[in-house]
Image: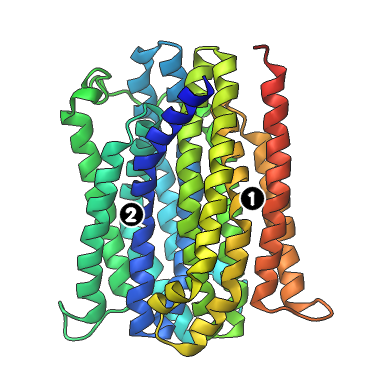
């Protein structure tokens, strides 16, 4: 059974990895274009992009509750209830878009946490305001994204992500460099392109739901339901801790970017490059985690506890082994990677001083991610949220702030990366222990 579940996880994770790498490739495109356009614009996207990711991932995390719910419905043979669950998740996405758009227009709560250069802050605000136009589409599409993963249908997501990345590469290049205007738009061009791609992805997802044969059996858009308080409450009950976990994890890195901003645009730009590389590496364990959640959820819905246990173990083993290899490859190719991101020697020097931390913590990030998603397959979301709060805010953020600025020998930006490594180690231990306890509680 172990090899069968390993194979299923890999078959699901492979197209998911491509999809997520394509999505993250959009961030890389922005970084490369702006790295050669201007350091101030790159720093603005480092700050503004961090805030946007924190907001969107928090809201998307809530919507991801549709994934374990649908997986368990399918595993239990209750396919007739799947369409209604998805429709309620779409209603929730529209409701969550309202505070999301408002916050992007008024990001003062986060921007006020650090002294940011006026030019960088002004561009970051304009960047966020333009991204707000794509927020409703992004949330609706991500609901469909989580739903498709729960049903084991990752290939359409891969094709949509590849198409979106290609569209962004062309459009962002035209806007940033000024091919479509009298002068380059810099960070604003990246924001416009990102918003357009969000609506493009939503359109593709809607077409797939309407016209694809695999989705026809579920009659997803037939008999459209009004908001149902009971289902919405269940989605929020499961999703709110998931969303807050996402927010804690992402916001810790966002706030790091804000704190680092006071060290100057060069440090921010160098940190941004390494953060992009870390985010790209994270796509591998995330793809495995999503696939593991689907398998654990299907098995739990069918009350096949042995299969759920084996699926969780297979996901952890794959994540640890593959992430270790990825970290080693990153360490070997650090100079070539950094040179591709920036032509500024000072920025390159900052990046090279930090990249080793990313290579080291890959395995711990992979293990804590897969453990958290496996627990979501069991519909366990509350306790992992508290683990993330303690680890990422308590150790990663506050510990990093102390190491960076207030230790006997302040470490600067490196202090945040040291603390982040420690936070991931602890998260892997705690979440792994919680998952072990859960699978041991259920009889074979």
Q: Residues within 10 Å of mark 2 (few under 14, many from 20)?
A: many
- The x and y percentages for residue 416 are 67, 69
The answer to whether residue 27 is above or below residue 135 is below
- The x and y percentages for residue 434 are 71, 33
Q: Nearer the viewer, residue 80 or 413?
A: 413
Instruction: Tell me if 221 is positioned left or right of 144 in this view.
Output: left
Residue, far bottom: 345
Secondary element at image label 1: helix
Mark number for residue 316? none
Can residue 117 be seen? no
- The x and y percentages for residue 120 are 46, 81
Mark number for residue 22? 2
Image quadrant occupied by the C terminus: top right
Looking at the image, is mark 1 or mark 2 nearer the viewer? 1
The span from disc 1 to disc 2 (Cα, nearest Å) is: 24 Å
Can residue 43 be seen? yes
Mark number for residue 364? 1
């Amino acid at each position: 059974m172990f090899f069968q579940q390993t194979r299923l996880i890999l078959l699901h994770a492979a197209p998911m990895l491509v999809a997520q790498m394509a999505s993250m490739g959009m961030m890389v495109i922005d970084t490369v274009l702006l790295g050669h356009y201007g350091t101030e614009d790159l720093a603005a996207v480092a700050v503004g992009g961090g805030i946007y990711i924190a907001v969107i991932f928090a809201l998307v995390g809530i919507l991801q509750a549709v994934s374990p719910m649908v997986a368990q419905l399918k595993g239990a043979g209750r396919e007739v209830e799947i369409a209604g669950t998805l429709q309620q998740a779409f209603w929730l996405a529209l409701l969550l878009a309202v505070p999301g758009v408002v916050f992007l227009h008024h990001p003062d709560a986060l921007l006020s946490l650090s002294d940011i250069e006026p030019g960088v802050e002004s561009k970051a605000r304009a960047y966020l305001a333009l991204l707000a136009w794509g927020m409703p589409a992004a949330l609706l599409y991500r609901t469909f994204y989580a739903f498709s993963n729960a049903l084991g249908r990752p290939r359409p997501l891969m094709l949509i992500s590849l198409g979106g990345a290609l569209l962004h590469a062309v459009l962002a290049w035209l806007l940033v460099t000024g091919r479509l205007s009298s002068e380059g738009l810099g960070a604003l061009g990246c924001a416009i392109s990102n918003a357009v791609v969000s609506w493009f992805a939503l359109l593709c997802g809607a077409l797939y739901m309407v016209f694809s044969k695999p989705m026809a059996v579920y009659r997803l858009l037939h008999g459209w339901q009004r908001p149902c308080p009971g289902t919405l409450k269940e989605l929020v009950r499961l999703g709110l801790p998931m969303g807050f976990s996402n927010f804690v994890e992402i916001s810790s890195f966002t706030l790091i970017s804000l704190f680092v901003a006071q060290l100057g645009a060069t440090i921010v730009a160098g940190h941004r490059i390494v953060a992009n590389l870390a985010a790209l590496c994270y796509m591998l364990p995330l793809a495995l985690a999503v696939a593991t959640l689907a398998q654990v959820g299907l098995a739990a819905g069918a009350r096949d506890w042995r299969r759920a246990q084996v699926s969780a173990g297979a996901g952890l083993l794959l994540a640890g082994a593959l992430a270790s290899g990825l970290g080693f490859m990153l360490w070997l190719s650090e100079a070539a990677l950094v040179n591709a991101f920036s032509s500024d020697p000072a920025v390159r020097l900052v990046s090279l001083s930090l990249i080793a931390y990313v290579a080291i913590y890959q395995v711990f990030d992979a293990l804590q991610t897969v453990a958290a998603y496996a627990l979501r397959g069991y519909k366990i979301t509350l306790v992992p949220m508290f683990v993330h709060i303690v680890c990422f805010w308590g150790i990663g953020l506050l510990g990093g702030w102390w190491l960076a600025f207030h230790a006997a020998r302040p470490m600067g930006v490196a202090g945040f990366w040291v603390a982040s490594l420690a936070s991931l180690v602890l998260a892997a231990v705690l979440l792994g222990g919680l998952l072990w306890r859960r699978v041991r509680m259920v009889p074979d």
